[in-house]
Image (cartoon, grey):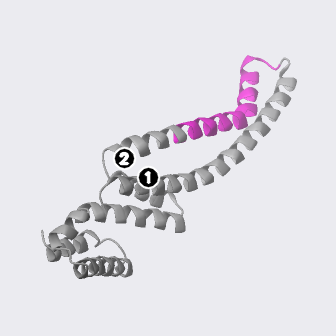
Amino acid sequence: MDKITFLTELEMELDELPIEEKDKLMNDYENHFYNQETKGKSEKEILSDLKEPHAIGKELKAKEAISYAKVTPNLRNIIRAIMASLSLGVISFIFIIIPLLIFLGILLLVFLFSIFLILFPIILIITSFVKGIQDSFSNFLFSVSYSGIGIVLIAITIIITRNLYRLVLKYLSWYIQTIKGRIKQ
């Protein structure tokens, strides 16, 4: 591979990025080649110090997806950032999907438990009518307090979800930096 082939392949890999970002990155790589050539390095030496264009493109797309998810927070953007980060390698599955599934599983259980607590008075009223209405008033008052606990848990779950979104983006950024440090630049 020579410099022209490298830059052409890199430009094709960066097609999904915004044009300003793509132009800036291409200019940076062209300047890198120019600076290294003025220091007396050959094209082969310069290319051996760089990653493959495909790997560079995947990493830059993942960074762009994370940046976009930070600016425009929604489910679609976080999924896009996660998928772009997963494209960086097989080990990504272990370091991204497994922790994410654990957090989401716990969050889902807390959310479902909260919904159950909120609906507890209705469930108790229905069972009281089915079984009879003995001692049901005190049970109903207890269930109302459980409903209050459920509402508090829902509020806490919403706060945790917002913070989890930010935490996932920070974790993905950290992961990309770790991969970038592990792979030859």
Q: Dot 1, how many residues are within 10 Å of its Cα: few (below 14), some (14-19), or many (20+)?
A: some
Q: Residue at x 35, y 52 (%)?
A: 182
Residue 147 visible: yes
Residues shaded magenta: 104-133
> Where residue 175 is drawn, which disc sits there?
1
| Quadrant the N terminus occupies | bottom left
Residue 17 drawn at (x, y percent): 35, 72
Q: Is residue 156 left or right of residue 6?
A: right
For the question of whether residue 72 can be seen, the reply is no
Residue 14 % position (x, y): 29, 71
Left/right of residue 52 with respect to residue 139 in the rendered view: left
Q: Are marks 2 and 1 in contact (CB under 8 Å)?
A: yes
64 up-or-down from 124: above or below: below
**Location of residue 62 by image quarter:** bottom left
Q: Is residue 125 above or below residue 37?
A: above
Residue depth check, mark 2 versus mark 1: number of the one nearer the observer: 1
Q: Nearer the viewer, residue 82 or 24?
A: 24
- Residue identified by numbered label 2: 92
Residue shown at 75% from the left, 43% from the top: 152
Quarter of the image with the C terminus in it: bottom left
Tag 1: residue type? Tyr
Of residue 178 and residue 45, the one placed in the foreground of this image is 45
Secondary structure found at label 1 = helix
Q: Quadrant of residue 106?
A: top right
Q: Residue lying farthest left? A: 1
The amino acid at mark 2 is: Ser
What is the spatial separation of the Cα atoms under label 2 and label 1, in whole angstroms?
8 Å
